[in-house]
Amino acid sequence: MKNPGAAESRRLVVLLEAALVREARLWKVPVFKNGCIQGADISSSQHQEMILWLGDMSRLFQFCPETFALGVCVLNRLLSTVKAQPKYLKCIAFTSLVLAAKINEEDEVIGSVRDLVVQSGCNFSTAEILRMERIILDKLHWDLYTATPVDFIHIFHALLVSGHPHLVPSIGVGSGVGWDSAPEPGVLPSGPGHQKRPSGLQVALWTRQVQHCMACHQLWQFKGSTLALAIITLELEVLTPDWFSVFTDLLKKAQVDSVEFIHCKEMVDEYLHSLEFSLPTNSVYIFDSTQIHEEEQRLGRAGRGRGGKEQGDSDEYYDGFRCLYREEMTPGAEGSDIEHLFDAKKKDVSPCPPLHPALN
């Protein structure tokens, strides 16, 4: 009887080889010279801003990560083929995402082009989008589907699960999780507490990281296979002690140049850590109940003075409920203490508990 794991590994290797062939044939990115795309007036910052905007649109339309990645690849291929003017950049980017959605998404997810334009808040007409679709399809010879970095993330993940079963507790077995469901892009796992993740969470983290890397113009020079392998290798270094043997197996199958890979891995590591350190500092809420306790004791003494212990306690509870539900209270002696408590809190205490930096 044949080993099903070996058969699955062979199928995945064939899938990887087909993706590498598509990438070698169709991968193309704009060449930048003096801060602008060569032959055009589109700057690297404008290009990067447009990719980030595509990410916002993809989340707004609830497209899958593969659609966003393919849209970026279509945009890059077109900008490396024609001399586009900056005023048409947003229309080109939006149309690239629409074409990617028509390839990857179900019809009920996409809806009509007019609906997408309305949701995006853009002022394009449907005719403009259709005309731009024809231009893109003509310039790219109707051959839009190429292997994206997100595709390679899923292929490499499947190869890891199939060829190295001992890694399953660390990397999970699920996939296809969206951009927003993953942890922060720069948060790299460390320590034994990160060794076991829910199924699919690790590949979701890799997917989110590669999407953020696609918006970094310094990383556009690397192919999607190289970029995906660099992100996975950085994680493997933390997740498993025998990461090098796993990495060399993937490197051999991916047919990636080792010098280029090392350069890519160093740049990805630096970029992801810059994202991590740009996040807000970790803070904790500290709640001091001393003042509240003193006020409760004072109210208790005031209640007992008004009509005995039992009646005072009962009034205190009912007054608290009335205040909680904003019921009307008769101003006077009965409500003065409660009002004084809230007045004091408004003057001396912030409505939010104070934030203090977390201590190591």
Image (cartoon, rainbow, N blue to C red):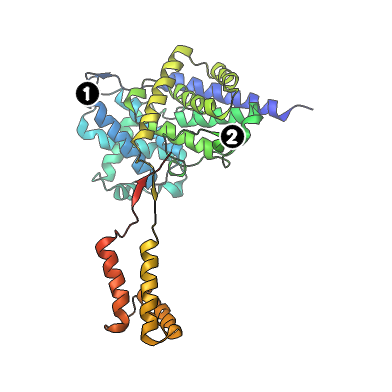
Mark 1, secondary structure of its residue: loop
- Tell me where residue 320 appears, x and y as whole percent: 39, 75
Q: Nearer the viewer, residue 128 or 24?
A: 24
Q: Name the amino acid, label 2.
A: Ser
Q: Nearer the viewer, residue 66 or 359?
A: 359
Residue 127, placed above or below residue 239: below
**Residue identified by numbered label 2:** 170
273 displayed left or right of 228 = left
Marks 2/1 in contact by CB < 8 Å: the verdict is no
**Residue identified by numbered label 1:** 40
Give the number of callouts.
Answer: 2
Q: Name the amino acid, label 1.
A: Ala
Q: Closer to the N terminus: mark 2 or mark 1?
A: 1
Mark 2, secondary structure of its residue: helix
Image quarter where the C terminus lies is top left
Residue 201, placed above or below residue 301: above
